[in-house]
C-alpha cells in the first residue's frame, strides 16, 4: 500500500504523468539505509515499467546487499540498458568539517562495489583549502580501493550569500587539481526557496 502512495505521487508530479525521458532520483537522508528491500516493490509497480534511469544520492557508507545487487542487475537487463545508462550512484562522502569521523564517513571498498552495479561518481562539498586537502586524502583512499569514477568538488552553500563567497574559489581549486567542478545551479536560480 505504501508503494502505491509513493508511485501515485511520483506520477502526479512528472510532466507527462508517465515515464518518458525523465529519470528517478532517490535522495533524502540516506536512501540505501534500510530501504534496499523496499525498492524492488516500488520499481515493479505497473506505473514504473517505463522508467529507464535511476540515481541514488548516497553518502557512500551503505553496503549494497547481494539481493539488491542481483535485483538491480536484473532490472537493467529487463530495460536493455548497460550499466552506465541506467543506474547511477551520486556519492557525497562527509569530510571531517561535517563532524563525521573519517572511519565512519570514508568507505572506499563500499563505493568501489557500487561500480559493479552502475556508474558512480564522488562529489565532495568543500569551503576551505583544508576541506580540499581532506578531499584529496579521501580520493587517494578511493583510488587505492580501485574506484575509477570521476570526482567533483562542489562549493558549500544552500543560500546565495554563502555560495557566492566560495563558488569561484572552489572551481579554481578543482581545476588546479585536475578534478571536476559541480555547481549548485538551484542556488542562483531559486535562492533558498522550498521545493526546489
Image (tube, helix red, strand yellow):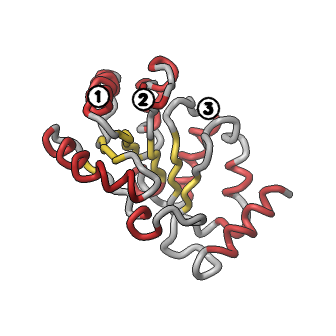
**Residue at position x 69%, y 49% from top?**
40
For label 1, count other residues whose C-alpha is less than 10 Å away and answer few (under 14), some (14-19) or many (20+): few
Is 73 displayed left or right of 121 in the figure? right
Please state, as top left, top right, bottom left or bottom right, where the N terminus lies in the image: bottom right
Assign a secondary structure to mark 3: loop
Q: Are marks 2 and 1 in contact (CB under 8 Å)?
A: yes
66, above or below 102, in the image: below
The disc at residue 65 is: 3
Residue lying farthest to the bottom in this orientation:
16
**How many angstroms separate mark 1 from mark 3 (CA)?**
34 Å
Q: Which mark is residue 97?
A: 2
Of the numbered discs 3 and 2, the one sitting upstream in the chain is 3
Residue placed under numbered mark 1 in the picture: 130
Q: Classify mark 2: helix, strand or loop.
A: helix
Task: Locate the C terminus by quadrant.
Answer: bottom right
Report the Cα–Cα distance between label 3 and label 2: 30 Å
Give the residue drawn at x 40%, y 43%.
120
Residue 96 placed where, x, y %? 42, 25
Amino acid at each position: 500500500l505504501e508503494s502505491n502512495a509513493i508511485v501515485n505521487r511520483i506520477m502526479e508530479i512528472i510532466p507527462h504523468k508517465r515515464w518518458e525521458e525523465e529519470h528517478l532520483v532517490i535522495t533524502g537522508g540516506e536512501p540505501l539505509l534500510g530501504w534496499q528491500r523496499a525498492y524492488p516493490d516500488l520499481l515493479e509497480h505497473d506505473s514504473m515499467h517505463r522508467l529507464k534511469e535511476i540515481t541514488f544520492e548516497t553518502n557512500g557508507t551503505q553496503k549494497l546487499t547481494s539481493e539488491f545487487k542481483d535485483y538491480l542487475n536484473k532490472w537493467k537487463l529487463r530495460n536493455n540498458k548497460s550499466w552506465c545508462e541506467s543506474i547511477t550512484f551520486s556519492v557525497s562522502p562527509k569530510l571531517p568539517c561535517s563532524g563525521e569521523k573519517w572511519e565512519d564517513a570514508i568507505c572506499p571498498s563500499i563505493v568501489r562495489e557500487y561500480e559493479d552495479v552502475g556508474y558512480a561518481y564522488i562529489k565532495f562539498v568543500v569551503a576551505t583549502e583544508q576541506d580540499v586537502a581532506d578531499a584529496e586524502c579521501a580520493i587517494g583512499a578511493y583510488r587505492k580501493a580501485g574506484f575509477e569514477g570521476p570526482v567533483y568538488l562542489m562549493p558549500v552553500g544552500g543560500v546565495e550569500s554563502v555560495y557566492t563567497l566560495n563558488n569561484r574559489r572552489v572551481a579554481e581549486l578543482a581545476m588546479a587539481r585536475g578534478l571536476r567542478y559541480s555547481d549548485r545551479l538551484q542556488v542562483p536560480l531559486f535562492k533558498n526557496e522550498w521545493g526546489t
